[in-house]
Amino acid sequence: MKMSKLFVQTQREFPADAEVVSHKMLARAGYIKKLTSGVYNFLPLMWRVLKKVEDIIRDEMDKAGAQELLMPFVQPKELWEQSGRWNAYGGELMRLKDRHGREMCLGPTHEEIITSIARDSLKSYKQLPVNLYQIQSKFRDERRPRFGLLRGREFIMKDAYSFASNQEDLDKEYQNMWQAYTNIFNRCGLATKAVQSDSGAIGGNVSHEFMVITDTDAGENDVFYCDDCDYAANSNHAISNLPEAVLDGKFDKAEIVDTPDTHSIDELSAFLNIPSTVICKSLVYIIDKAPVIALIRGDKAVEETKLLNAVGGVEIRIATSGEIEEMMKENGFDAVAGFIGPNGLKKYGEYDIKFVADKTVENLKNFVVGINQNDKHLVGANWGVDVELPEIKADIRLVEAGEFCPQCGKPLKVTRGIEVGNIFQLGTKYSKPMNAVYLDSDGKAKPYIMGCYGIGVTRTAAAAVEAHHDDFGIKWPLSIAPYHAVVVPVSVKDELQMKTAEKIYNDLLAQGVEVVIDDRDERPGVKFKDADLIGFPYRITVGKTISEGKVEFVTRATGEKKDVTSDEAVKTVVDAVNNIQ
RNA sequence: CGGGAUGUAGCGCAGCUUGGUAGCGCACCUCGCUUGGGACGAGGGGGUCGCACGUUCAAAUCGUGUCAUCCCGACCA
């Protein structure tokens, strides 16, 4: 490809609306162009990268025994009602109507469709197990798209679904996919960590996420992990053992005391001169419009996903101060956040108020708790005497670094990660409600035991930029670079330079290398800057040293430069390309 | 959804306070010159200033509304 014809427009500056490195780089280097919030054009360079990621995925999935197909992007409401997710999926599901008023949605994932395909075709246990996958655009109407390709609304995903007749086969396929994923990300030049995670709206029990570890803001997930054993978990799923703490408030009796202006746990703990660990904190949440009050030890924070799971909801948010005010009024109180407690709160609007107790409050004795009166707290409280312990008891606590590994007891560490893939054991979550069954050897109809396995193709490419770049641009791994190499004649008007460059270019082309020749009549600085920004893994510069029979060979990843003969340069690139796994 | 900000050429921005023929840099086209890390000179093309309504002789500029985009927050009680 001639650079003069390559469809790319590099920019002198980073776009003003980009925050993270991958977004800045890809936009400035002419890979992507935003169409609207969270929706991007993949320009020719980007498309080449994405196709390479896809091809690696296809290769490994096919090797692992999965079969590719392609399902529709637009899906009818009926299937989603069968699975129960039309109501359960929440605002991310992009709903629309066709001209007849029939309700449809844009596919955010394809469990419903694949299950309907399977139930029409997979009638016998003899046909199982099966793994089917596709690579396709998905649409999720994210509440706040950001970070360029890392959290877009429309994105490309590989989604695979397995069907088995027993748990053992599902376990095998789960391990099979685990290995395939490890291979895929390695081949894309990404080191990943498999971490336990919440299964969210997809559902199911066992699940792992493949995280690219990064210490930048681009990593949207907190990952807790242990150096001494293999424990690693997303913060939405992590558990830990706590260090010992004071759990007895040592108050002589239960009484209401004045605690003026103690709006925070710190203020309250300082005012009463007690550790925050003997305070029972009450947080008001709205889960699917219904009020839920979470009780947790004063020094700990609530993990919202865990709380959501504890009550079986879909969308969670903290209540506004206005809602708290209303709720207090309805129950005959007048208290603001900071003085809320479980006693006496019954209803809010049409809903009964639910209470959820974190495990950290169960063992508290003579503790401090709000009583829905401003500037007052109840001290010396005990469960069953002064305050009822809620029926729902669950671990809703956010783990913190320094707490102890649940497997081996050593301190946990925390880091940030970009989730590029995930694997779930779904079980019968979809097959049962959708009545997707096969006939087993005993002649009985049974629902499939399913698994699903996703990889964010666009996100994987962006994560590769996050992992491989410098101030000058992208340093693509050779396996997913849009082109392997660029040949740069310093002066296109110098006949010897141009002839040599063209020969190198043609030699590389002949040997299967994807190469660009920068034939533009530009000054060398411009060409070098563009080459670095775009991120060609290898650059062969043909300049003045050609009089000595040498060209300059630059490796983008390492910055290494050396003068070699044309033939040596060609051979180095060809060898490297042939060694791509 | 709550809070904040911004919409002027493909990109980055000025102009708005104080209303009067729409500007700068990059990019693009032509010519010259230059050729190892985003040169230089001369000439040129491209924007109904997000949209609507209003005020006014006159609106990028003032007012109202609306749409869009970005940031922060929504794990504080």
Image (cartoon, rainbow, N blue to C red):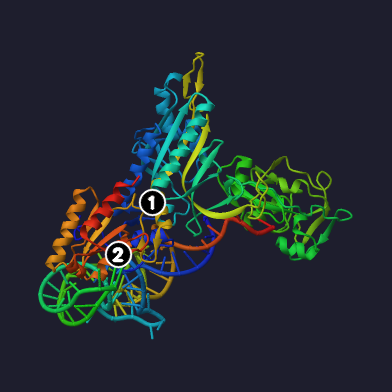
- The residue closer to the viewer here, A463 or A281, is A463
State whether residue A67 is above or below residue A544: above
Expressed as whole percent of the image width and height from the top left, the position of residue A95 reads: 42, 42
Expressed as whole percent of the image width and height from the top left, the position of residue A572 reads: 28, 54
Which mark sits nearer the N-terminus, 1 or 2? 1
Residue at the image point whose x is 76% and y is 65% from the top:
A270
Residue A102 appearing in the image: no
- The residue closer to the viewer here, A5 or A282, is A5
In the shown orientation, is residue A202 left or right of residue A355?
left
Q: CA distance from mark 1 to mark 2?
A: 29 Å
Expressed as whole percent of the image width and height from the top left, the position of residue A256 reads: 83, 57
Circle 1 or circle 2, nearest the eye: 2
Instruction: Residue under label 1, please give it.
Output: A461
Q: Check disc 2 and report its element: helix, strand or loop.
A: strand
User: Where does the N terminus of chain A fall, quadrant-wise?
Assistant: bottom left
Output the chain of dot 2: A
Farthest-out residue, top: A443
Residue at the image point whose x is 48% and y is 39% from the top:
A178
In the shown orientation, is residue A265 left or right of residue A170?
right
Judge the density around disc 1: few (<14), some (14-19), many (≥20) Cα neighbours within 10 Å. many
Q: Check disc 1 and report its element: helix, strand or loop.
A: helix
Expressed as whole percent of the image width and height from the top left, the position of residue A85 reads: 50, 36
Residue at the image point whose x is 70% and y is 53% from the top:
A329
Quarter where residue A515 is shown: bottom left
Output the chain of dot 1: A
Instruction: Residue under label 2, please give it.
Output: A562
Name which residue type carries label 2: Lys
Total count of labels: 2
Do the numbered discs 1 and 2 sit on residues whose CB atoms are within 8 Å?
no
Quarter where residue A499 is shown: bottom left
